[in-house]
Image (spheres, rainbow, N blue to C red):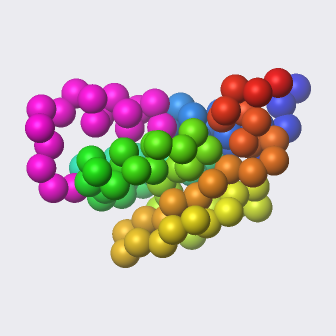
Amino acid sequence: MLTRGERRAENEAIFRAGNEAIVRNLDAPEGALPLICECGSAECFDRIQVTVEEYEAVRSHAAHFVLESGHEDENERVVDVFDHYVVVEKTGVGRRVVEGAP
């Protein structure tokens, strides 16, 4: 049985995969992309506006995610704050889940 932190991390990984598909399937996107908040809440489908360059910078680190401001939890550390979103770094068990470690 998964812990709450493990479930949230798995949800975040699923939302991240969806956002990566959005970025991958757009032809030369300009401006901000309508991405899905990558928080771990299964009920959250909030949209955040992030440019391709901003998203690529976040994704350059496996444990970093883009979230609607205020959606971070106790297993995350805020690493950057922007007007419309925050970048968090997973810690603890959540980090092990998203990095694929046992």
Within the magenta stretch, is there residue 30?
A: yes
**Residue 3 in magenta stretch:** no
Q: Is residue 97 above or below residue 31?
A: above
Relative to 1, is 44 on the left or the right? Answer: left
Residue drawn at point x = 37 percent, y = 75 percent: 83
Q: Position of residue 1 (x, y in %)?
A: 88, 26
Tell me, yes or no, if residue 93 can be seen here: yes
1 with respect to 89 (left or right): right
Q: Is residue 69 above or below residue 49?
A: below
The quarter holding residue 89 reads bottom right
Q: Residue at x 58, y 65 (%)?
A: 79
In the image, the segment drawn in magenta is: 16-32
Q: Which residue is more in the foreground, 3 or 60?
A: 60
Residue drawn at point x = 45 percent, y = 50 percent = 58
**Residue 34 shows in the view:** no
Residue 65 higher or lower than 28, as above or below = below
Query: In the visual, does 1 lie left or right of 26?
Result: right
53 is higher (above) or lower (below) than 24? below
Q: Position of residue 60 (x, y in %)?
A: 47, 43
Quadrant assignment for the C terminus = top right
Q: How many marks?
A: 0
Q: Pinpoint residue 61: horizontal percent, then vertical percent.
A: 54, 44
